[in-house]
Image (tube, rainbow, N blue to C red):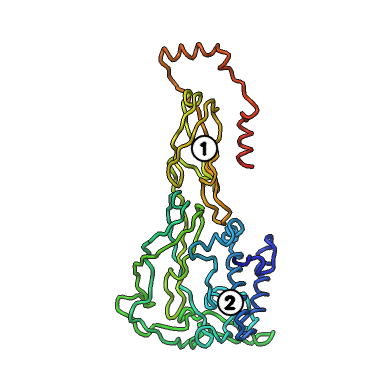
C-alpha cells in the first residue's frame, strides 16, 4: 500500500499551500542526491516527496486525493506523480530550491542529464473519454487514437553553443550589494541544451512530426465524472533527449436511460399499477450487470424503497460496492372507463380502502433520512 502523501511531507490535511511548499523543500533538501550520493533509500524518499508535492500543491489534484486517495490517480497505471524519474522532478520543481544547491537550483546535480543539463518536458495532451455506467461498474480498457508530436526519424541534435548544453545561462552582475548571480532558461535552445543539427524536410523547426498513435488506456472501476487520469509519456515529445509529456484523460459519464447514480449507489424508478401493488407481482429491472427480477409484495405502498445490496458501483477506494435502490411508484390512471369509474366510486365508501398507515409505512422525510444515513 502506498504511503499517505501528507505523512510523507509530515503535514496535516489542513496545511496551507505555503506550508506544503515549505515541507516539500525541507524534505527534498534532506534527501537530495547531492547530499546523499549513492544512497538508494534517500533517492526513493526524494522521489516520494516530489510525488506528494506534485499532487498536494495542485488544488484540483489535492481535492481528488482527499476524496478518493491514491485510487484517484493510480487506476490501471495512472499516477498523480507516480513513476516520476529524476528528470521529471528537476524539470518541474527546480525553482523551489532557489540557491540551496550552488545557486542554480538542481543544475549542480551530477546525475542529471549530461553535465548538469536541465531536461525539457514535452507538452501534455488532453482527451475526454465517455463511459457508460456498465463500463464504470466493471472497469474497461479503451484504445484511443491520439495525435502527438514525435521526434522525426533522421533528426539529430547538437550541443547548444549559447549555454554549452546546460539549458541555462548564468549571469553575474555587480550591484551595490555585491556580486549577484542569476540563472535563466537559455533562449536559443529553450532549456533543452541542444539545437537542431539535421532534420527531414517534412519536420517542423524543432524536428517534430505529428503522428497518430493508438494508446491503450486501462480505466479502473468506480471512476467519477470529471475525474482526470494520467498516462505518463504519451503526450508530445520534447526536443533532443527531453522527456515526453503526459496524456491527461478526463472521464465523462454518459447518462443511463433508467439508472441514476449517486456516489456509489444507483437509483431506479419502478412504476406499478394499483392492481399490481394490491395483489403483488414480479418485475424485471435494469442493473449495471444485467437485468434481474424482483418481487413486489402484495399491499406495497407507493414510495417504498427496495434495496438491492452490492448492485451499485464499486468504490474506487476499494471500500466495497454500492447498492441499487428501487423506488416503487404506484401509477394512477388519468382516465377511466365507465365501469372502472363505478368500481372506484364504490370503493370510496369501502372501509377497507381507507388509508391506515402503519408504523413501518414511513413518511417521505423519514425515507429520505434513512437513505442518507
Identity of the residue drawn at 58% across and 77% down:
94
Number of numbered discs? 2
Q: Residues within 10 Å of mark 1 (few under 14, many from 20)?
A: many
Q: Is residue 364 above or below residue 112?
A: above
In the image: residue 307, left or right of residue 258: right
Q: Which residue lies under the disc numbered 1? A: 326
Q: Secondary structure at mark 1?
A: strand
Marks 1 & 2, CB-CB < 8 Å contact: no
Percent across and percent down for residue 274 are: 48, 23
Identity of the residue drawn at 50% across and 11% down:
346
Pick out the residue farthest to the left.
201
Classify the position of the C terminus by image quarter. top right
First in sequence, mark 1 or 2: give its number: 2
Q: Secondary structure at mark 2?
A: helix
Percent across and percent down for residue 11 are: 69, 66
Q: Residues within 10 Å of mark 2 (few under 14, many from 20)?
A: some
In this view, the mark in front (1 or 2): 1
Residue 159: quadrant of the picture: bottom left
Pick the residue in front: 293 or 153. 293
Q: Which mark is residue 94?
A: 2
Identity of the residue drawn at 46% across and 66% down:
231
In the image: residue 177, left or right of residue 334: right
In the image: residue 201, left or right of residue 151: left
Amino acid at each position: 500500500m502506498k504511503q499517505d502523501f501528507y505523512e510523507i511531507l509530515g503535514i496535516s490535511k489542513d496545511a496551507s499551500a505555503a506550508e506544503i511548499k515549505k515541507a516539500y523543500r525541507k524534505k527534498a533538501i534532506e534527501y537530495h542526491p547531492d547530499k546523499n550520493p549513492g544512497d538508494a533509500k534517500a533517492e526513493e524518499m526524494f522521489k516520494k516527496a516530489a510525488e506528494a508535492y506534485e499532487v498536494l500543491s495542485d488544488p484540483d489534484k489535492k481535492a481528488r486525493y482527499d476524496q478518493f486517495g491514491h485510487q484517484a490517480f493510480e487506476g490501471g497505471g495512472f499516477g498523480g506523480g507516480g513513476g516520476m524519474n529524476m528528470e521529471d522532478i528537476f524539470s518541474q520543481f527546480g525553482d523551489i530550491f532557489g540557491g540551496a544547491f550552488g545557486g542554480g537550483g538542481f543544475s549542480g546535480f551530477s546525475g542529471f542529464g549530461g553535465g548538469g543539463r536541465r531536461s525539457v518536458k514535452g507538452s501534455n495532451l488532453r482527451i475526454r473519454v465517455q463511459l457508460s455506467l456498465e463500463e464504470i461498474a466493471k472497469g474497461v480498457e479503451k484504445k484511443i487514437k491520439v495525435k502527438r508530436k514525435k521526434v522525426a526519424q533522421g533528426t539529430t541534435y547538437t550541443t547548444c553553443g549559447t549555454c554549452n548544453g546546460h539549458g541555462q545561462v548564468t549571469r553575474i552582475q555587480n550591484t551595490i550589494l555585491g556580486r549577484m548571480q542569476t540563472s535563466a532558461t537559455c533562449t536559443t535552445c529553450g532549456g533543452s541544451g541542444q539545437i537542431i543539427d539535421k532534420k527531414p524536410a517534412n519536420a517542423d523547426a524543432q524536428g517534430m512530426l505529428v503522428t497518430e498513435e493508438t494508446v491503450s488506456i486501462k480505466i479502473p472501476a468506480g471512476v467519477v465524472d470529471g475525474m482526470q487520469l494520467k498516462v505518463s509519456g504519451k503526450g508530445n515529445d520534447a526536443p533532443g533527449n527531453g522527456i515526453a509529456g503526459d496524456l491527461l484523460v478526463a472521464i465523462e459519464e454518459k447518462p443511463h436511460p433508467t439508472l441514476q447514480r449517486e456516489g456509489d449507489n444507483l437509483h431506479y424508478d419502478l412504476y406499478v399499477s394499483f392492481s399490481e401493488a394490491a395483489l403483488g407481482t414480479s418485475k424485471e429491472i435494469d442493473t449495471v450487470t444485467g437485468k434481474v427480477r424482483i418481487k413486489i409484495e402484495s399491499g406495497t405502498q407507493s414510495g417504498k424503497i427496495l434495496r438491492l445490496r452490492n448492485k451499485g458501483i464499486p468504490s474506487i477506494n476499494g471500500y466495497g460496492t454500492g447498492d441499487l435502490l428501487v423506488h416503487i411508484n404506484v401509477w394512477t390512471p388519468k382516465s377511466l372507463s365507465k365501469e372502472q369509474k363505478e368500481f372506484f366510486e364504490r370503493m370510496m365508501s369501502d372501509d377497507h380502502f381507507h388509508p391506515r398507515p402503519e408504523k413501518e409505512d414511513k413518511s417521505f422525510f423519514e425515507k429520505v433520512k434513512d437513505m442518507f444515513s
